Amino acid sequence: MGFASSMKSVADVDKSHLCIGCGICTSIASSGAVDLKLGQDGFYHPEVLDEVGQEWEKVKAICPGITLRQTIEVQTHEEKMWGPIKGIWTGYATDDEIRWHASSGGGITGVLQYLLEKKVVDGVIHIGAEPSNPLMNATFISRNRSDILRQSGSRYAPAAPLVNIRQILDSSNEKFAFVGKPCDVAGLRAFLEVYPHYKSKVISLITFMCAGTPSMHGTEALIDALGINKEDVEQFWYRGRGWPGRATVIRSNGEQVSMSYNESWGKILNKHLHFRCKICPDGIGSIGDITFGDAWEEGSGYPSFEERAGQSLIIARNQQGRKLIEDAVSNGYLSVQKYSVGILDKIQPYQRDRRRLVAARLFALKLSGTKVLQFDGFNLLYNAILISPKANLESFLGTAKRIESRTKFGCAIYLTAQFLNELLNKLGLMKRSLKKILNFDKSSSPA
Ligand SMILES: Cc1cc2nc3c(=O)[nH]c(=O)nc-3n(C[C@H](O)[C@H](O)[C@H](O)COP(=O)(O)OP(=O)(O)OC[C@H]3O[C@@H](n4cnc5c(N)ncnc54)[C@H](O)[C@@H]3O)c2cc1C
Ligand code: SF4
Ligand code: SF4
């Protein structure tokens, strides 16, 4: 599905608003041909400085703004919705400091601790706060407990963990684990297919459920709302140090200022999401070996206001991921308990809804002539028919409205969709009025 074959360059991906700034094209293209720059919109963009040349075909097969592929076939309703599941648990890192410092239960960092301390890997490639500017993200190679502890916690801002991946893998015979967003992991998985000789160096691909990346303007708005100058920020974290944890700034005078997760994510950051995230077929993170997430409250699907000891949701996507969780548990790094896939709908309502609505959004893009992701194996149509035609049409309309201004065809699609929506509303109204009349007739007729 999609018009991916018409992508001619990384600039094309960027112009189509499909570049999420993972950075892998800068690593594949010949030295210095592509750079990654933070744009005015607060997101990373590739800047083409020289001919990408014959490497373009490889970039095209790897870039998660062009192609996303899930190769594991699934059969059950739950797996069509939530991706392959070879094991599902809730759990936490047994190291209390890691559990407290991390985003949820420290599941990711607990697994990384096992991998490093048992010498399964030599390093972990992942992101964390840039030391000289704690509002920005940077990519790190962590080699011990204090490194992974420092990088633990979610960073709700653009991050490019793959920017030097090929150079890192080329520079030694070391083995690595990688942590990234689902789109980063999809890029790395595809990279390993195109360059299979790196497979022996990348031992584990770890990801998390991802609602989307907010631009740097989201972080700036958050800092503003805390009433602080950017220059006055000594340390900054989005959450963690408890569950869900508060977005916190430590000022240069040592004063600590914070706001709740519900305010920071729910009222500020999620207003700044990337367009690519709205049409993301894999925010559930089905392409990694293991997906982590928040094991939120079953009742509401959102965090409780009361801070508690964190609980991670843990899903093994393949046998390798399952074995890694089992090994981390049997070596005492993780504590887990079995979980039911049936509850996912209740604890991850945002992921559930986007998964069902994304086919309509992608269809709107496709019809408008906008270049679309090429994707395979995500069962999006199966999920789309689980919700009403009206919800699908509204989702279609929302996307069409966003692209309306971009093309003449987009405008035509928007107007047609709006007309259909009006028609559907009118039909709904007529149906309700008819029902009322019939009920009136019934109630007024003698028994
Ligand atoms: C942008 C974003 C959106 C998210 N959306 C959801 C969601 O919809 N539902 C849900 O359940 N969970 C979501 N999460 C994940 C959640 O916040 C936790 O990261 C997850 O529950 C794992 O917790 P943990 O305690 O096991 O991780 P930790 O032990 O704290 O480890 C977190 C790891 O993630 C890496 N990381 C942090 N931020 C980024 C980033 N921006 N890009 C790449 N790597 C990063 C760190 O380097 C670290 O290794 C999101 C996270 C991010 C960053
Ligand atoms: S590889 Fe990553 S950074 Fe490069 S164009 Fe694709 S999404 Fe953007
Ligand atoms: S929502 Fe999808 S595209 Fe956006 S950052 Fe997350 S995985 Fe990447």
Image (spheres, rainbow, N blue to C red):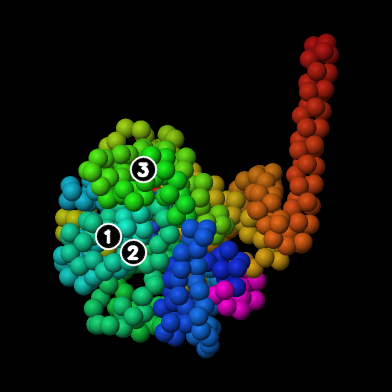
In this picture, is 224 found above or below 36? above
Q: Would residue 203 appear left or right of 218 to someone viewing this image? A: left
Q: Report, in whole angstroms, how far the alpha carbon at label 3 lies from the one at label 1.
A: 19 Å
Q: Position of residue 177 (x, y in %)?
A: 29, 69
Residue 131 numbered mark, or none: 1
What residue is rendered at 75% in x and 44% in y?
421
Do callouts 3 and 2 mark residues in contact (Cβ within 8 Å)? no
Name the amino acid type tagged 1.
Pro
Classify residue 10 by image quadrant.
bottom right
What residue is rendered at 40% in x and 62% in y?
159
Q: Which range of residues does the magenta coloring cover?
A: 2-11
Classify 10 Å Cα crowding around label 3: few (below 14), some (14-19), many (20 and above). Answer: some
Residue 138 numbered mark, or none: 2
Q: Nearer the viewer, mark 3 or mark 1?
A: 3
Q: Nearer the viewer, mark 3 or mark 2?
A: 3
Do callouts 2 and 1 mark residues in contact (Cβ within 8 Å)? yes
Q: Is the CB of mark 2 within 8 Å of ligand 1?
A: no
